Image (cartoon, rainbow, N blue to C red):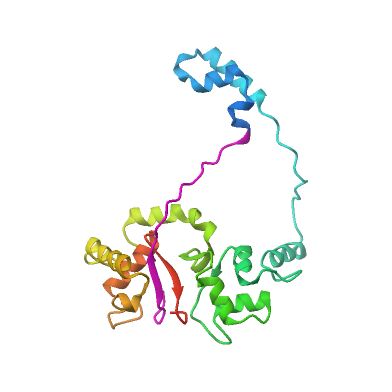
């Protein structure tokens, strides 16, 4: 995160269970009794010929997929451009539902401090929604009723809340590595202190937690700043609010 940002972090309390994806044709209600028996039995109890026959009958019981629309082998540059612009909400009817619906449609908006006419994440809304107030944009991104979270996608982004499970693999990978950019001097203690303060005091900004920088160069982060960014990386805390984009 760049200097001058101040985000309000809170401990993530969740009890989410991902539903396993199952194939429709593997429902045992759709299979013949012999196949069900085979699936419930230890494979080692079947002879090779019996197993082959059961597998053959299993595959015969699978209903063929419904043919889909014809897939084109190629697209013209004009067709590809129109598809991309439509997907980005830059062509066709204006997106309805306000900035909140826009985030769900785009599946995320990149955040940045760069500001000429406005900050880049505000320009995304203006380009697709027209004259919309900054207050409405910030309410959709970080308001009390917003269904979003901040995370590092291709870059720092505000993302629809339903994408939280999709980043589980990235959180686990970072957790197993132990760090991303900076390494803590006392990892366990620094992280525990941040979590304890957030649990006791509620959402706090980096400044309220102790300051983001040591006072040196741009990326010369304080121990608290490194700890809270790490906890954000692994999903222990979340950025729930920005105050004037801080």
| Quarter of the image where one finds residue 214 | bottom left
Which residue is nearer to you in this view: 32 or 143? 143
Q: Is residue 212 shown to the viewer in this render?
A: no
Choose top left, top right, bottom left or bottom right for residue 77. Answer: bottom right
The residue that appears at 31% across and 58% down in the rendered structure is 178
In this view, the residue farthest toward the bottom is 117
Q: Is residue 93 magenta?
A: no
Q: Position of residue 238 (x, y in %)?
A: 41, 65
Q: Quadrant of the N terminus?
A: bottom left
Taking 197 as reference, is 89 left or right? right
Residue at x 39%, y 58% (from the top left corner): 13
Residue 104 appears in view: yes
> What secondary structure is the magenta-colored segment mainly?
loop
**216 vs 126, nearest the viewer:** 126
Location of residue 36 in the rendering, given as x and y in whole percent from the top left corner: 56, 21
Task: Decide if residue 233 is on the left or right side of residue 100.
Answer: left
Q: Magenta span covers which residues? A: 1-24
State the residue in front, 171 or 146.
146
Total residue callouts: 0
Q: Up-down: is 17 above or below 23?
A: below
Magenta stretch holds residue 6:
yes
Where is residue 228 shown, x and y percent of the image? 34, 68
């Amino acid at each position: 995160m760049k200097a001058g940002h101040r985000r309000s972090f809170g401990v993530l309390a969740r009890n989410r269970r991902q539903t396993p994806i199952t194939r429709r044709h593997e429902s045992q209600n759709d299979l013949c009794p012999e196949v069900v028996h085979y699936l419930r039995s230890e494979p080692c109890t079947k002879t090779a010929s019996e197993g082959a026959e059961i597998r053959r009958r299993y595959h015969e019981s699978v209903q063929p997929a419904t043919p889909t629309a014809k897939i084109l082998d190629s697209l013209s540059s004009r067709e590809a451009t129109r598809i991309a612009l439509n997907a980005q909400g830059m062509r066709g009817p204006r997106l309805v539902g306000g900035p909140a619906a826009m985030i769900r449609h785009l599946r995320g908006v990149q955040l940045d401090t760069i500001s000429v006419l406005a900050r880049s994440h505000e320009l995304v809304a203006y380009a697709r929604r027209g004259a919309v107030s900054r207050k409405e944009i910030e309410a959709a991104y970080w308001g009390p009723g917003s269904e979003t979270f901040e995370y590092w996608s291709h870059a720092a982004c505000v993302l629809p809340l339903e994408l939280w499970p999709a980043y589980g693999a990235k959180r686990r990978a970072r957790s197993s590595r132990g760090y991303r950019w900076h390494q803590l001097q006392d990892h366990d203690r620094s992280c525990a202190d941040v979590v304890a303060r957030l649990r006791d005091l509620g959402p706090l900004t980096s400044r309220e937690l102790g300051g983001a920088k040591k006072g040196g160069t741009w990326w010369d982060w304080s121990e608290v700043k490194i700890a809270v960014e790490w906890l954000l990386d692994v999903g222990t805390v979340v950025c729930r609010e920005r105050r004037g984009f801080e």
